[in-house]
Amino acid sequence: MTKPRITLVTSADMPNLYSDEAGLLDALAERGTDPRIAVWNDPDEDWTGAGLTVVRSVSDYAQNRQAFLEWTKRVPRILNHPDVLEWNSDKHYMIELERMGLPVIPTTWLEPEQKLQKQQLHSRFPALADFVVKPAVSSGVRDIGRYTANDPYQRQAAITQAATLLEQGRSVMVQRYMEEIDIHGEISLVFFNGLMSHSVEKRAMLHPSSVTEPSMHEAVVTCQQASEEQWRWGEQIRAIMHAYVRQRMGRDEQFLFNRVDVVPDGKGSFRVMEASLVDADLYLTSHPAALGNFADAIAMRAFW
């Protein structure tokens, strides 16, 4: 019997996928599949023979999002679904999920078409405490800045970052920095085929007056099986996200992978920072079962 072909998709600057996915090819081969790696915008790649195409470390998609989305629609069998990749590659989706009841971090949206002057940007930033400035379309943790509101130098740096992004035609998100991250940590809930695989707690990475470098990744503190409380949060998040998908597509769609970053509020609930269904780092070496769980999820879809 012919083994099902699986193509794991990456970018040219990550020819071997994320560092914690080094064992994924072997794990997929052990499950009776024929895995390989390809770069999404390689002009010599023939996607008609790619088999099941799994989007992974496409860390450059934000630099040319439209070309990336056009490519997803040309690939015969791609996961996650092209419509999911389209809405999830622009964080404006958080507006829709909040309307449907998902607790998210309050956000002020700055749009290029608003033609905001520096004084107008200044007036849209918080007056107190720390806040975060980041683009609505970005990969990983790139181009995120944290600033202290009542420090004039940091406030000017925030204005400069926002103005630069807007001049580039990029939408900007301004969010209050959640002090709960320093107290309770930031948690990533990782799902494969709709089931929670593991959860990861991360330390606070942003410091005031800092903007993340392009190569930065979140630092893992601990990884474990999801707790009962996290399972409850996961089910609440999953229900709202799939309701959104049904609203968009007229039917439900199974996510191969989904990473949801949340901040506990210290009162038994949480706020969602983002949901990652495009190029999410899934922390496959942070838990003994994680890589195997992901390989099982991919192989299951390959044999469908």
Image: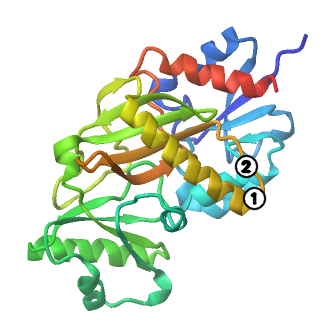
Residue 125 higher or lower than 285, as above or below: below
Q: 192 and 14: which one is in front?
A: 192
Residue 155 higher or lower than 42, as above or below: below
- Mark number displayed over residue 29: none
Task: Tell me the quarter of the image containing the N terminus.
Answer: top right
User: Is residue 109 rendered to the left or right of residue 53?
Assistant: left
Question: How dense is the environment of label 2, judged by Cα within 10 Å: few (below 14), some, or many (20 and up)?
Answer: some
Q: 86 and 217: which one is in front?
A: 86
Quarter of the view holding residue 118 = bottom left
**Picture coordinates of residue 265, whole percent (x, y):** 26, 50
Task: Tell me the quarter of the image containing the C terminus.
Answer: top right
**Picture coordinates of residue 196, whole percent (x, y):** 51, 31
Q: Please name the residue shown 66% across and 52% down the image.
A: 84
Which residue is label 2 attached to? 252
Residue 192 higher or lower than 63, as above or below: above
**Residue 85 seen in render:** no
SS of the residue under disc 2:
loop
Quarter of the view holding residue 248 = bottom right
**Picture coordinates of residue 236, whole percent (x, y):** 49, 47
User: Is residue 281 rendered to the left or right of residue 162?
Assistant: right
Question: How dense is the environment of label 1, judged by Cα within 10 Å: few (below 14), some, or many (20 and up)?
Answer: few
Residue sticking out furthest to the left? 151
Quarter of the view holding residue 31 = top right
**Picture coordinates of residue 207, whole percent (x, y):** 17, 53
Q: Please name the residue shown 70% across and 44% down the image.
A: 42
Q: Amino acid at mark 2?
A: Asp
User: Is residue 17 rendered to the left or right of residue 85?
Assistant: left
The reply to whether the C-beta atoms of the residues labelled 2 and 1 are less than 8 Å apart is yes
SS of the residue under disc 1:
helix
- Mark number displayed over residue 249: 1
Residue 199 higher or lower than 249, as above or below: above
